[in-house]
Every structure is written in structure tokens, then in C-alpha cells.
Amino acid sequence: MQKTKKEPRYQKIAYEIAKRIVAYQFKEGEKLRGRSMLASEYEVSSETIRKAMRLLTNIGVVEVRARSGIYVLSHKAATLYLEQYKKRNEVHRMFTDTQELLKETRRNHRMLEKHVETLLESSKSDVFPFDYFTIKLTNEDHNLGETVKSLDFWNQTHGLVLAIEHEGHLYQAPNPNIPLEADMTLYVLGDDYVKKTTESMFGRD
């Protein structure tokens, strides 16, 4: 499992100082405290404070004056930095959440595939308590090129497509947006009534 990259400490400190500037705790033209005092306040090394100041200098929030110190340069630049920081973190959170959702979807899909495989391998009479049938599509069938979704298969037939077999591959819990083609075999959960409505859907009255 890939670990989320932790944000460097100096970036968090730069953000905190920018927040204080936006809140007018530090005003434009005001000299910031020395590196050692800031390092003590944030409980980090002077090098970490130096990196935070360099970041704020590069984006025009503060400026370094030779032999004088670091001064607040722009309240507006600090505000812009906060907005960009929050937006970046929001995008990062969305990316992380999306990764987790994809992982969960893959886990659920694998579980569904296993369940479908078990159902298909089960005996109708001994273990499997439901009826299912197969129907192999031909060039003469109606609705080729449509999908299970576009045909509203469940509502129209009251059957559930468990799998699709095509060109030697069995696709369990198939994507409902896959176009239906000749030579596909549909595995459909349903009784004789469902079989008749399914055959009717493909023009086999």
C-alpha cells in the first residue's frame, strides 16, 4: 500500500506565519522575530525556519534586508498564498479520497466476481437456489449494439445479467455499458418467464 507523502514541516510553518500576517498579527513593514525565536516558538530547528522564510520570500510575502532582518512585505501576497495552500490541500485530499474509493471499488468488484463464480459453478438442484439460463446472441437478434443499461434489462425482463462470455473470456459482473454483440453468451439469473421476456427482447418470439 502506497503511503501518503507527509507535508514538510517548513511548509506548515510558512502557512502559519502567512495566516498571522493575514490576521494582522504581523503588519506590512514590520520586522519578524529572529530565526532562533521563531524556532523556539514552533519547536523546530533554525534551518526549518530558514526554509520557511525562503519560501515566503520567493512568493513575495516577506523580504530579507541585508544586515537588518526579515520584514513583512505584502498582506495581499500572504492572502493569495493561503488560498493556494488551501486549494492544493483540498485537491490532495480529493486525490487521496479518490484513491481509497478506487481501492474499495476494486475490492468490492473482486468479491462480486468470486460470488458470481461460485453461483455459476453451483448445482441448480443441490446448492444454487435460483434459476439461471444462457442465451447466445446471433447476427439475427434484435438490439445488437445496445447495452444492458440502455435496454433497461432488469425492468424489461426482470432478469439479472450475471456474466457475459465472449471470445473465450468470461466477464463476471460485467460492465452494464458494454455493447452487446453477436457470439456473446449472456448468463442471466431468472426463471422461465425471464427467459421468455429476454428472448422477446432479442426478437425471438
Image: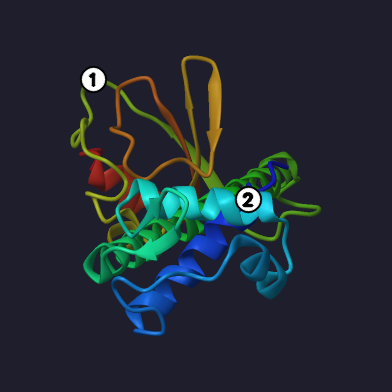
The amino acid sitting under disc 1 is Asn
- The residue that mark 1 highlights is 139
Quadrant where the image shows the N terminus: top right
**Percent coordinates x, y for residue 23 in the rendering:** 36, 84
Q: Residue at x 32, y 46 (%)?
A: 148
Instruction: Choose between 140 and 75: the one closer to the eye.
Output: 75
Q: Residues within 10 Å of mark 2 (few under 14, many from 20)?
A: some
Distance between mark 1 and mark 2 Cα atoms? 31 Å
Camera-near label (1 vs 2) is: 2
- Vertical comparison of 103 with 73: above or below: above
* Label number found at residue 112: 2
**Percent coordinates x, y for residue 157 in the rendering:** 33, 57
Q: How is the image coloured?
A: rainbow
Quadrant where the image shows the C terminus: top left
**Percent coordinates x, y for residue 45 in the rendering:** 73, 56
- Residue 131 appears in view: no
